[in-house]
Amino acid sequence: MEPLLKVENLTVSFQADEGRLQAVDGVSFHINRGEVLGLVGESGCGKSVTAHSLVRLIPSPPGRIEAGSVRFDGRDLLALPIEELRQIRGRAISMIFQDPLTALSPLHRIGAQLAETLQLHRPIGRREAWAIGEDWLQRVGIPDPAERLFAYPHQCSGGMRQRVMIAMALMLNPDLVIADEPTTALDVTIQAQIFELMLALKRRDSSILLITHDMGVVWELCSRMIVMYASRIVEEGSVPDVFSAPLHPYTRGLLSSMPSRQQRGRRLEAIPGQVPSPMQYPRGCHFCDRCPLAFDRCRVEKPELAGLGEGRRVACFRAGTDRCK
Amino acid sequence: MNNPGSQTAPLLEIRNLKTWFPVRRGIFSSVTRHVRAVDGVSLSIGRQETLGLVGESGCGKTTLGRTLLGLDRATSGQVLFDGKDLLTLPSRARQILRPRLQMIFQDPYSSLNPRMTIKGIVTEGLVEHRLLRGTREQEAIRLLGEVGLPPDANYRYPFEFSGGQRQRISLARVLSLRPEFIVCDEAVSALDVSVQAQMLNLLMDLKERHALSYLFISHDLGVVKHISDRVAVMYLGHIVEEGRTEEIMDHPGHPYTQALIDAVCIPGRPRRRKIILSGEIPSPINPPPGCPFHPRCPRVMDVCRREYPAECRQGTRRVYCHLCGPKQE
C-alpha cells in the first residue's frame, strides 16, 4: 500500500546575518493513510520548519528548500505549479499552525472566515456555509457558538482562537492534517475534548502529522513517531517500541527527563549541557558533545539513519551493538 | 531526611484570602461586578515543604501567588508569615520581611532587565536591602556557582543566555536575599523538557541546601506530582481539594481533580479516556451560586446548585464536595 505522504531528503536552510543556517538536514519519512505520526523534538530542532516546508510555506528569502521531494498522492508538492498546490492546501492537506502567517485574519468575523474556507472548496451558499461553521464551533467545544460566529478573533481568548483554527482544519475532511502544537495553549480538560475530535478523524481514514514537544501527547494520539535533534531525524519507530526501548541516546535522555517516568522526589536524569546553536553544530553527529556514549567516530562522521527492521530506524553508530544497552 | 512541615507552626498560613478586581465599564461608571480571582482560600505551608498548586486558566493560582508577595492587593483575609499578618503590617515592617519571601516568574525573557549585566541583576537586591558583604563581584560569582553558571556570566547580558539559563539567573537573584519561602509561578513551564529536568533538580537541591519552602504553581500535573510534598487543586478562585501528593494524585476525591488527572497524558498508561468534561471553563466574574464546579460536574446533584460545599476532612486531606460525607468514604 502506497503511503499517503512520502518525504525524501528534505533539506532547508535560512540566510541569517551570521551566515547560512541549516534548519532541516536530509529528512526522510512517510505517513500512511489513517495514521497519526508524531514528530517530536525540542525547540530549534527543525520540526516546525519541516512542517511548513511540506506545503511550501517557508518565506523565501530568507528560507530556501535546497533539496528533497514531498510526494503526496503520487505528486511532488515541491515541484507543482503554485496554482495546483493551492488547490491541495486547505482541502486535501490542511494545517494547524501557530504563526501569524496562517492564523486568523483580524479584520473578519469568525463566521465569515469559516464560511470562506468552506465556500472556496465547495459549491454551497452563504447560509449553509455559516450553518456548517456553527456546527463545527460546537464540535470543538466553543460555548455559545451562534454568538461566537459574529465575534472577531481579538475578542476571543488564545485557546478559543486555537480551537477555531482546529475547526477550520478539520471542516473539509482533509486527507492529511499537519498540526503544529495544536493543543499547547489549551487547558488539559479542553485538550481532552480536542483529542476525541482528532481520533474521530483518524477513524474516518484521514492522517495526521502531529508536531509536538510533549511526549505525553504523542503517547496519547500517535501510532508511530519520529524524533528530531538539531535538524536531523535520530530515531523512528512505533510509539510503544520507542517508549519501551529507545535506541538513540538522545531519545533515552528525553524520556528520562520526564517527571512522570521517574520516581517521585528523586533527581531526574537530565541531559547535560544544551542544544547547540545551528551556527555551531558539531562536525559528525550533532549530539556527540552531550552524548554519554560518544566516541571518536561520532565526532567526525555523520551517522546515517539505518533501518533495523519492523519500521525501526536509528542514526547512531552504537545502535545494534552491545554498547548501546 | 526530616518530615516536611513537621514544625508545629506553619511558615505561611493563608486564612480565607480573597482578591477581587473591580470591573468598570468606563472611567466614571460605578463598580457593580468583580473578577473574583481568589475567593476564600485557606492554605498552610510548613518549613522545608513544597506545596504544589494546580489548576487551569482563570482558576486564580497566579493571582494567589502575586497576592502573597503584595503584587496584587488582597480584598480580605489574612496571610500570616512566621506569625505576622503581611496584609496589615506597616510598610516599614513589611519591607524588612521582604527578602524572606520571593518569587520566580514564568517568562524567562521578560523577567530580567535587558540593560543590566548579570552581576548587576543578581546583586541588585543585596544593595537595595543593604545586605551586601564583600564586593558585588564576589557575591555574584558565589551565587552563580550555586545555580551552576560560570563566573564569566557576570559581565554578560541576558540576551546572551537561553531560557533555561535565564531562569537560573532569576534563581540566583532570589537566593541572594537568603529567602525562606519562594513562590515558583509556572517557573519551568516555558522550558523544554530536558532543560526543565535540570531546573527541577536544581530546585530540589536548593531546597535541601537552604531549607526552603516552595509554593509551586503549575498547570502541569506531572511536574507538580514529582516535586511537591502536598498538593492543592484550585478551581474558579476556590480550593476544591488539598492533601498529601500521593493521596490526591493516586486517589483523587473531588470530581474536578478526577477529571484533571484523567485528562493528563502519561506514557505507559492505557489511552482510553473515561472522563470528558463538557463545556468551558467559566469566567470568575459573578460565578454561579452553590459549588463553583456544578455546571460541568458529571456527578452534580440538586444541593450542588444551591449550597457551597462544606469542608470535609479525611485524615490529612480536605475536600469541598457534597458527595463527600462527614464520615470516611
Image (tube, rainbow, N blue to C red):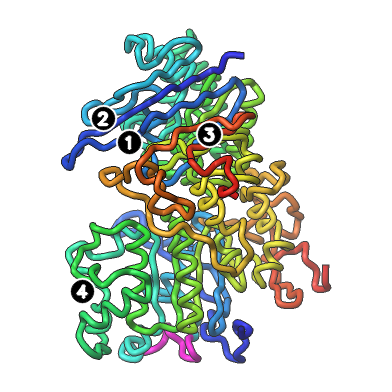
Point out the frontmost of discs 4 and 1. 1
**The residue tagged with tag 2: helix, strand or loop?**
strand
**Mark 3, residue position:** A145
Chain to which the residue tagged by mark 1 belongs: A
The residues tagged by marks 4 and 2 sit, at their Cα atoms, a distance apart of 38 Å
- x then y, percent, for residue A189: 60, 48
Residue B34 appears in the figure: no
Q: Amino acid at mark 1?
A: Ala
Q: Is residue B238 above or below residue B86?
A: above
**The residue tagged with tag 1: helix, strand or loop?**
strand
Callout 2 touching callout 1 (CB < 8 Å) = yes
Callout 1 touching callout 3 (CB < 8 Å) = no
Q: Quadrant of residue B101?
A: bottom left
**Mark 4, residue position:** B120
Q: Which mark is residue A63?
A: 2
Q: Residue at x 66, y 58 (%)?
A: B257
Q: Amino acid at mark 2?
A: Gly
Q: Is residue B120 left or right of residue A120?
A: left
